[in-house]
Amino acid sequence: MAIEPARLEMLSALSRKALWLSSWTIHHANHIRPNTDGLKVGGHQASSASLATIMSALYFSVLRPEDRVAVKPHASPVFHAIQYLFGRQSREKLENFRGFKGAQSYPSRTKDTDDVDFSTGSVGLGVAQTLFASLVQDYVKAHGWMKDHREGRMIALVGDAEMDEGNIFEALAEGWKHGLRNTWWVVDYNRQSLDAVVREGLWEKFETMFRNFGWDVVIVKYGKLMDQAFAEPGGEALRRWIDNCPNALYAALCFQGGAAFRKHLHDEIGDQGEVTALVDRRSDDELLALMSNLGGHDMASMLEAFEKIDHDRPVCFIAYTIKGVGLPFQGHKDNHAGLMTVAQMEKWRAQQGIRPGHEWDKFEGLSQDEAALQAFLDNVPFNRAGARRLEAPTIDVLRQLEFKPAAQMSTQQGFGLILNEIARGDSELAARIVTTSPDVTVSTNLGAWVNRRGLFAKAENHDLFRQEKIPSTYNWDFSPKGQHLELGIAEMNLFTLLSALGLSHSINGERLLPVGTLYDPFIERALDALNYACYQDARFMVAATPAGLTLAPEGGAHQSIKTPLIGMGQDGLASFEPAFVDELATIMRWGFEHMQGAYGEGGSVYLRLSTRSIDQVPRIMTPDLQRDITDGAYWLRKPGPNAEVIVAYTGAVAPEAIEATGFIGESRRDVGLLAITSVDRLHSGWTGARSLRRDRRGVQHLSHIEKLLAPLPRDCGIVTVIDGHPAALGWLGSVRGHRVEALGVEHFGQTGTIADLYRAYGIDANAIIDAAESLTSGAPVLHRKMAV
Ligand SMILES: Cc1ncc(C[n+]2csc(CCOP(=O)(O)OP(=O)(O)O)c2C)c(N)n1
Ligand SMILES: [Mg+2]
């Protein structure tokens, strides 16, 4: 397939320009904008050069507006440069690259203003995100929501060393199970990582693996100059030499230049005949140009490779490149943090024909007509009219989420009951919820929902046990209308999928309300993917259950300790740990609205739930109580005016807190019991109010926790108790200067009964009573809980 020469010339010119602008951006950040921190821009210059041609081929020719791209973190300057050429990035932000509010070091959906599709930064995550985004697109399409919106290709530009990240392999397996389509991964095969040269032969293994998973693998090894040389007499020997040259040597020769290549070629394949003549027909510069004309740096080769794809199966392109190509440190193994010196830049500037003071001029130094270049850019298919970042209307959430009440319940059970009630109805909410779980669907109580709503698959597949009339509690039917995406165990995939589902409104223009479940301790396994999902502002709800010591006989391997701190610390995630199911129903209702930005900017929701069945509080849910629950706390027993001590608890330890409060109340005055449903919301409400008061002096805004604690006398003590790290609640004393005894779990748990463990780890009723005594004066508390 021949590429029209005029078009090729335009694209090559624009690619050179993108490389120049990206390099100048980096140079500017290091040498021109004063940087008092002395922090140099490492990692970007060589990595960006490596991808400049490939990205130019994509953005200036191959991509369509509906395609979505995850750009390798260190190629951010090329991305910004291309957007600048499109007119979507400002010179000011480029000049301020890596500066405050400037173009971001790593492409960011939320912080950059130039149309980043997927954030990247933590290597591996953006790659997997494209795969799951494609599955989500299929889900939306299968549910009949794509309408006239065209299917996009989900494309990742991948560093070769990035492939060491395990989450990519976890995603590959999942993609295969779900019949992945429309996904391209373009590997920048420069055979260099950050520290080193990539291990010889590794990529042959990857190639086989991709093919095994049903991917098309396209290797773009040689550029057109190479192809032409191979066709010359002696060319075959040259090709063999290139093929057999070890990665490290090839990189080193690229760094050393044409003369070094010549010497090696003469020594190793020189024949005083055709091969020698082929080499010697070229000057040193021409020889270097030939030897660095790998496929990934050849516009025609890349276009050909991309345009040849005529199917929607996933494709892995392996494009041979040289890290830092065209720059003085090309190929050098230390080039990751390599920067051009001022002198090197001056020399390069002259070669590019860029006049001082005209570095940012879009077409400076290009020989093509400016109007023609601009017209070409205006007509690039990627730039076709219409917004790329889409919007979707909000989904009405039912006024109240119902559940079948029982005298005793666990929050996990309640979660299943609430979803079951939603599933029974035919609300828009029910239609837009999509659930997913990494092999813990049944054990996290999603079974009833799945029974009613079915599993998602592109093709119908009936539950064999049912067909064979073998009794089973669960109906495991797959269909294109199903609303549960079953995942393998890998928790990284859960959060990456939630990230993709939770961006559907923006990417597909169709809102989904994703709900994921997993065991609470395994959040830690996938923490980076959770962080990534939140960083790019995906909207989802995750129910983590069971949690804490409370899952007693399961033992220390499954008992989460620090997850409440994760919930507090994770930006973009509102975390809750209710004790009672009516609280949970209130929180989930709020959560579905919060995910859609009903209360300010919105965000995702984390529910830390328990399997412990506890006595429910019979009560009428009033709007005031609902508001208190979603703000984070309410008085289960209001303290009197002379309170000597209060107990503040969160989650499954409610019965212990209630019981202890009763005992303490026999010997201490006006004891209160504070039910905390969200320590995260309480804390952020408090810090938020403080900064509001600081920023706007005179504003008297008080946070929820400040109001709740306001009536307490100054010397009242606070006992906090949580089945998790005590630091999560320990800060309560700072709100109004009360003394605190913070009870919680700090060490790996044992197996045992809940009573055994609560006693051993000091979060039972007697531990609360002891803590209350230590905070108050007076005679010992009269009664204690008897050992059972
Ligand atoms: C999870 C994670 N670990 C480490 C890093 C630091 N880091 C950034 S790029 C990189 C490797 C770069 O190699 P490659 O992917 O081949 O890209 P190239 O620099 O060759 O373009 C590393 C280790 C990171 N960004 N994310
Ligand atoms: Mg590399």
Image (cartoon, rainbow, N blue to C red):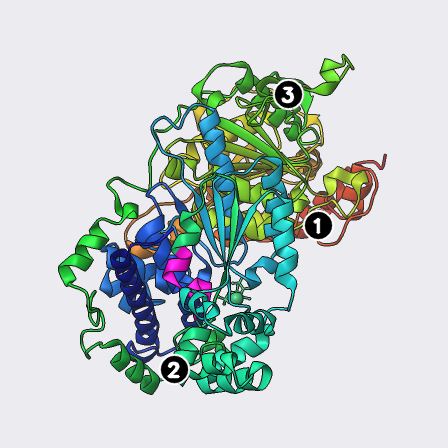
Q: Outermost residue, right direction?
A: 788
* Residue 318 located left or right of residue 99: right
- Quadrant position of residue 617: top right
Mark 1 falls on what kind of element? Answer: loop
Viewer-nearest residue: 3 or 580: 3
Calculate the distance from the C-alpha at mark 3 to the C-alpha at mark 1. Answer: 42 Å
Toward which corner of the image does residue 747 lie, by quadrant?
A: bottom right
Where residue 423 appears, as percent x and y from the top left, is 55, 18
Disc 2 residue crowd, few under 14, some 14–19, many 20+, Cα 10 Å: few
Q: Quadrant of the C terminus?
A: top right
The residue that disc 2 covers is 285
Q: Is residue 625 visible in this depiction of the protein? A: no
> Does the residue tagged 1 have its C-beta within 8 Å of any atom of ligand 1?
no
For marks 3 and 1, give the one nearer the viewer. Answer: 3
Q: How far from the left and from the top, in percent, is residue 203?
A: 61, 60
* Tag 3 and tag 2, C-beta contact below 8 Å: no
What residue does disc 1 label?
745
Name the kind of residue labelled 3 in the image: Asp
- N-terminal label among 1 and 2: 2
Instruction: Give yes or no for residue 53 being in the magenta stretch.
Output: no
Nearer the camera: disc 3 or disc 2: 2
Residue drawn at x 46%, y 74% as measured from the top left? 291
Q: CA distance from mark 1 to mark 2?
A: 67 Å
The magenta segment:
293-302
Q: Is residue 301 magenta?
A: yes
Which of marks 1 and 3 precedes in the sequence?
A: 3
